């Protein structure tokens, strides 16, 4: 599976600049006026993982295939978007299609880049976007709960919608839904307010290491768990540098990780994802799965026939595969296990599936 992150925020906060940097492209128009992005841009990016290279060297693989992540650059939203202000309703619908939301927050001053608001206030800006998504959810919930529409909604979804409506009407935290309902059912509800969120504070070049007063105010309210401090301009510069010079440049400006690496790590964490590997002479490949995924479900990521005809999974941990120099020695040294249908695949497992067709 590949997961999709939508980059949202007010106009002129740096969404398209970040998108171009993350995807190493110039697909998204970045300009100094509101709504320069109209149709969403989509970029598919390979997820870097040093483990792939190490496995491929041992297996002498002809090909190495990374798993991927998709980024979607969604046009800037404004206050009143849920009622059609700006380019509102159209782009709220684009957000429904993503797995996670990257909130791009302006945390820099600039006389050259327009601000749709009179001053820089990251807390206010985020609250504008979240309010518009909540109002869009309210409209969607009310429509689905109308008497003539209720018959098309199953019982579990009705309960979710009713609890969500209560949360909106009484200013309650939506997290209560996550405690009471299955994750799959919540995803099917299509509610924007329930989507996992990453907050990206876009700062100037001088603030990328330690942040600034704007990021401090934001973190004081929303915490550090899902918050990243990134300079979209610096990310663009990194992508324009010769690959051999990237490490030296990052060390010079005090960056330990790229914004892409940090976003992927946060994305995997909030979406509760793991990676397993297949490795042999033909190819070494990474596969993305949900945490607590059973072996047959993991096999189904390769092909549905693998899941239907699943028998056993030959399983070696990444560490054992490396230290025993591949499949043969792992088996000889008792590090390979045969796991059945109830086995929960762990991050880093190297798997070979046995199945009937």
Image: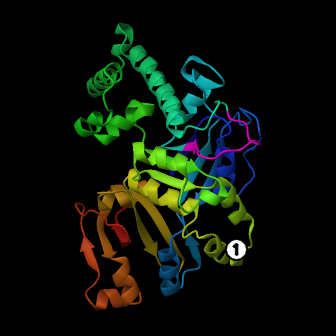
Q: Position of residue 120 (x, y in %)?
A: 60, 38
Q: Position of residue 329 (x, y in %)?
A: 35, 91
- Name the residue at the top extreme: 147
Q: Residue at x 51, y 75 (%)?
A: 50
Q: Position of residue 18 (x, y in %)?
A: 64, 51
How many callouts does the rendering have?
1
**What residue is shown with label 1?**
243
| Image quadrant where one finds the C terminus | bottom left
Q: Is residue 2 visible?
A: no
Query: Eyeballing the image, is 289 above or below 241?
Result: above
Query: Eyeballing the image, is 251 above or below 37?
Result: below
Left or right: where 81 falls relative to 277? right
Any magenta on residue 111? yes
Any magenta on residue 110? yes
Query: Eyeballing the image, is 235 above or below 112?
Result: below
Query: Eyeballing the image, is 216 above or below 140?
Result: below
Q: How is the image coloured?
A: rainbow
Q: Position of residue 238 (x, y in %)?
A: 69, 65
Check disc 1: other Cα within 10 Å, few if <14, some if 14-19, many if 20+: few
Q: Quadrant of residue 85?
A: top right
Between 256 and 213, the one lying in front of the other is 213
Between 294 and 176, the one lying in front of the other is 176
Q: Is residue 75 visible?
A: yes
- Span colored in magenta: 104-115
Q: Secondary structure at mark 1?
A: helix
Q: Residue at x 64, y 34 (%)?
A: 76
Between 259 and 186, the one lying in front of the other is 259
For the stretch drawn in magenta, the main secondary structure is loop
Q: Residue at x 24, y 64 (%)?
A: 343
Q: Residue at x 42, y 33 (%)?
A: 193
Between 120 and 303, the one lying in front of the other is 120
């Amino acid at each position: 599976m590949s997961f999709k992150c939508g980059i949202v925020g007010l106009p002129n906060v740096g969404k398209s600049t970040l998108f171009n940097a993350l995807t190493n492209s110039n697909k998204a128009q970045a300009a100094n006026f509101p709504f320069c992005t109209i149709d969403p841009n989509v970029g598919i990016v390979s997820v870097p993982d040093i483990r792939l290279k190490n496995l491929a060297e041992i297996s002498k693989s002809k090909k190495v295939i990374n798993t991927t992540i998709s980024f979607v650059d969604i046009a800037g939203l404004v206050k009143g978007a849920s009622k059609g202000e700006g380019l509102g309703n159209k782009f709220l619908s684009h957000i429904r299609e993503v797995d996670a939301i990257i909130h791009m927050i302006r945390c820099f001053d600039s006389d050259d880049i327009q601000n749709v608001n009179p001053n820089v206030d990251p807390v206010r800006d985020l609250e504008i976007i979240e309010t518009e998504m909540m109002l869009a959810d309210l409209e969607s919930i009310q429509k689905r709960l109308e008497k003539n529409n209720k018959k098309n909604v199953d019982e579990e979804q009705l309960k979710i919608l009713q609890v969500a409506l209560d949360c909106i009407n009484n200013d309650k935290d939506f997290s209560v839904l996550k405690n009471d309902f299955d994750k799959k059912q919540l995803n099917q509800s299509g509610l924007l307010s329930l989507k996992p969120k990453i907050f990206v504070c876009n700062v100037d070049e001088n603030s990328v290491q330690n942040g600034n007063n704007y990021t401090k105010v934001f973190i004081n309210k929303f915490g550090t768990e899902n918050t990243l401090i990134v300079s979209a301009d610096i990310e663009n510069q990194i992508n324009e540098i010769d690959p051999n010079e990237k490490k030296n440049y990052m060390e010079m400006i005090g960056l330990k990780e790229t914004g892409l690496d940090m976003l992927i790590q946060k994305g995997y964490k909030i979406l509760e994802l793991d990676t397993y590997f297949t490795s042999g002479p033909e190819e070494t490949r990474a596969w993305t799965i949900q945490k607590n995924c059973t072996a047959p479900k993991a096999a189904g990521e390769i092909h549905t026939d693998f899941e239907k005809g699943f028998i056993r999974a030959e399983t070696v941990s990444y560490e054992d595969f490396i230290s025993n120099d591949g499949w043969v020695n792992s088996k000889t040294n008792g590090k390979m296990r045969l796991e059945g249908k109830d086995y929960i695949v762990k991050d880093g497992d190297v798997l070979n599936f046995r199945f009937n067709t």
